[in-house]
Image (cartoon, rainbow, N blue to C red):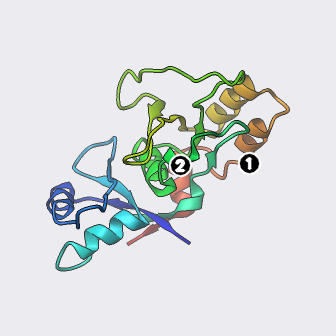
């Protein structure tokens, strides 16, 4: 099982990131609460560890499947989807508990959206070097996910069922249930 890592030393991460072999990408997401902390997935942590004298310590780790991803029935442009570890780390960095792919609306039309700030629940993310962009909706509570998915997909939909089965009610509950201290 893969994990997502909460790490505190942003300066060391930047130093090590510069030493990662060409062609490799460290996807690190600054924690919304600040303080130089960030979230990474398994592959990015491995790259950072290999770029230093010793492994970078993590404050917490969370099993990656604790942050569910909903792709929906109209998924397209799969070759440019971001790595799930990066997507999930991004969601945790925003104190989210889950994320849904919303690139196409219920009518199959591409969604056009400009996030207002880094804290906006809707954001763009694609694979580095990928072609088509993808639009995502981050959820900070189970209730928020249920309400959004009912409105976007209908009360008797796969999306509504997905939201109803989210394993945590909010970010604190997710950490309490799934986080392991280093």
Q: Residue at x 37, y 46 (%)?
A: 129
Q: Are marks 1 and 2 in contact (CB under 8 Å)?
A: no
Q: Is residue 42 left or right of residue 103?
A: left
- Image position, residue 146 (x, y; %): 70, 34
Q: Residue at x 42, y 67 (%)?
A: 42
The relative height of residue 10 versus residue 112 in the rendered view (above or below) is below
The relative height of residue 148 versus residue 79 in the rendered view (above or below) is above
What label does residue 79 carry, if any?
2
List the residue tagged with mark 1: 165
- Image position, residue 118 (x, y; %): 35, 31
Q: Residue at x 70, y 31 (%)?
A: 149
The relative height of residue 81 versus residue 114 in the rendered view (above or below) is below
Q: Residue extending furthest right? A: 156
**Quadrant of res 125:** top left
Between residue 104 and residue 88, name the one nearer to us.
104
The answer to whether residue 149 shows anywhere in this view is yes
Measure the C-alpha gap from mark 1 to mark 2.
28 Å
SS state under label 1: loop
SS state under label 2: helix
Q: Residue at x 16, y 62 (%)?
A: 12
**Quadrant of res 45:** bottom left
Q: Which quarter of the figure is the N terminus placed in?
A: bottom right
- Image position, residue 133 (x, y; %): 47, 35
The answer to whether residue 59 shows anywhere in this view is no
Q: Is residue 162 left or right of residue 137?
A: right
Label 1 crowding class (10 Å Cα cut-off): few <14, some 14-19, many 20+? few
- Image position, residue 117 (x, y; %): 35, 25
Q: Nearer the viewer, mark 1 or mark 2?
A: 2
Dot placed on the residue nearer the N-terminal end, 1 or 2: 2
Between residue 3 and residue 178, name the one nearer to us.
3
Between residue 80 and residue 67, name the one nearer to us.
80
């Amino acid at each position: 099982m893969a994990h997502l890592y909460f790490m505190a030393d942003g300066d060391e991460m930047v130093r090590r990131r510069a030493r990662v072999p060409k062609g490799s990408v460290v996807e690190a997401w600054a924690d919304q609460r600040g303080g130089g902390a960030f979230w990474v997935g398994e592959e990015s942590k491995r790259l950072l560890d290999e770029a230093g004298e010793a492994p970078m310590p993590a404050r917490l780790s969370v099993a990656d499947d604790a942050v569910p991803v909903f792709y929906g029935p109209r998924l397209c442009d799969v070759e440019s989807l971001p790595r799930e570890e990066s997507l999930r780390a991004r969601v945790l960095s925003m104190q989210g508990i889950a994320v849904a792919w919303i690139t196409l609306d219920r009518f199959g039309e591409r969604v056009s959206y400009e996030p207002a700030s880094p804290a906006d629940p809707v954001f763009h993310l694609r694979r580095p070097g990928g072609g088509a962009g993808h639009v995502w909706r981050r959820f900070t509570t189970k209730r928020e996910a249920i309400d959004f998915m009912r409105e976007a997909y209908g009360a008797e939909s796969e999306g509504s069922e997905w939201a109803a089965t989210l394993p945590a009610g909010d970010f604190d509950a997710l950490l309490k249930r799934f986080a392991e201290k280093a």
